[in-house]
Every structure is written in C-alpha cells, then in structure tokens.
Image: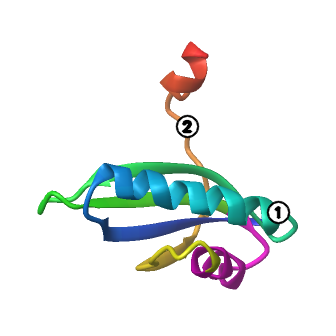
C-alpha cells in the first residue's frame, strides 16, 4: 500500500456535518479494509467559515481512495501520493494518550 493525502475544500457547512461524514467514512473504511485504510484526518476551518479536511490514507491506489470517498459520499478535490514523511516531533495527542 502507498500513502495518499486527500484534500476536501469547503466540504461541509458546519462541524457537525463533518462529524456525520466521518461516521460514514468509518463504516466504508471497515468495509474496504483490504484496499484502503483511513489513517487520520485534520478538520480545517476555511476562510469563508465552512469546514474542509485533509485526510491521510494508506491504499492500493488513488482509485481505491476515490472509491472509499464515493462510497461514503465525501467530496474529493485532490488526491496526492505522499513521497516521504518528516517528523519533527511526536504527535502531541498520541503522546498524551
């Protein structure tokens, strides 16, 4: 599997809408676990007040990521293959847990 980043700009009007979308994504990620693994997402506030996200996936192909997004009814603005990971410090959320 390769790592991909998915950009979803202005995908939802409110944070609760994004939470509802995440619930659908969780169900579809479990169903498609052989071809795609949803690793992490950052929910972002857009300049116009809407909500977007930047999501990290491990998948067999960008098409597998798009299939997951379509199945979960999630918009996709861009899918980019990750070339490398540089860690400057541990994730503070993971360290606190």
Horizontal side of 49 relative to 85 (left or right) equals left
- Disc 2 element: loop
The x and y percentages for residue 58 are 72, 61
Question: Where is the N terminus found, in terms of image quarters?
Answer: bottom right
The structure residue drawn at horizontal position 59% and vertical position 64%, both measured from the top left corner, is 82
User: For residue 59, what is the image quadrant?
Assistant: bottom right
> Would you call the spot at circle 2 few (<14 residues within 10 Å), some (14-19), or many (20 or more)?
few
User: Residue 27, position in %: x, y?
Assistant: 70, 60
Please identify the residue farthest to the top as the structure is shown. Answer: 96
- Disc number placed over residue 87 in the picture, else none: 2
**In this picture, which residue range is highlighted in magenta?**
58-70
Q: Please provide percent x and percent y for residue 76.
A: 46, 78
- Label 1, residues with CA under 10 Å away: few <14, some 14-19, many ≥20: few
The answer to which image quadrant residue 11 occupies is bottom left
Question: Looking at the figure, which quarter contains the C terminus?
Answer: top right
Left or right side of 86 for 2: right
Q: Nearer the viewer, residue 19 or 76?
A: 19
Could you tell me which residue is drawn at 59 percent across and 24 percent down?
A: 94
Of tags 2 and 1, the one toward the viewer is: 1
Q: Which mark is residue 33?
A: 1
Rendered position, 38 above or below 35: above
Q: Is 62 within the magenta? A: yes
Q: How far is mark 2 from mark 1, CA to CA?
A: 26 Å
Q: Is residue 32 magenta?
A: no
Q: Is residue 75 above or below residue 4?
A: below
């Amino acid at each position: 599997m390769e790592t991909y980043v998915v950009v979803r700009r202005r995908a939802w009007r409110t944070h609760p809408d994004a939470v509802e979308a995440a619930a659908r994504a969780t169900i579809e990620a479990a169903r498609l676990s052989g071809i795609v693994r949803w690793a992490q997402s950052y929910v972002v506030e857009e300049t116009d007040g809407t909500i977007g996200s930047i999501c990290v996936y491990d998948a067999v192909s960008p098409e597998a990521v798009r299939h997951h997004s379509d199945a979960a009814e999630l918009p996709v603005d861009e899918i980019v293959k990750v070339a490398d990971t540089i860690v400057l410090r541990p994730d503070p959320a993971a360290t606190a847990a």
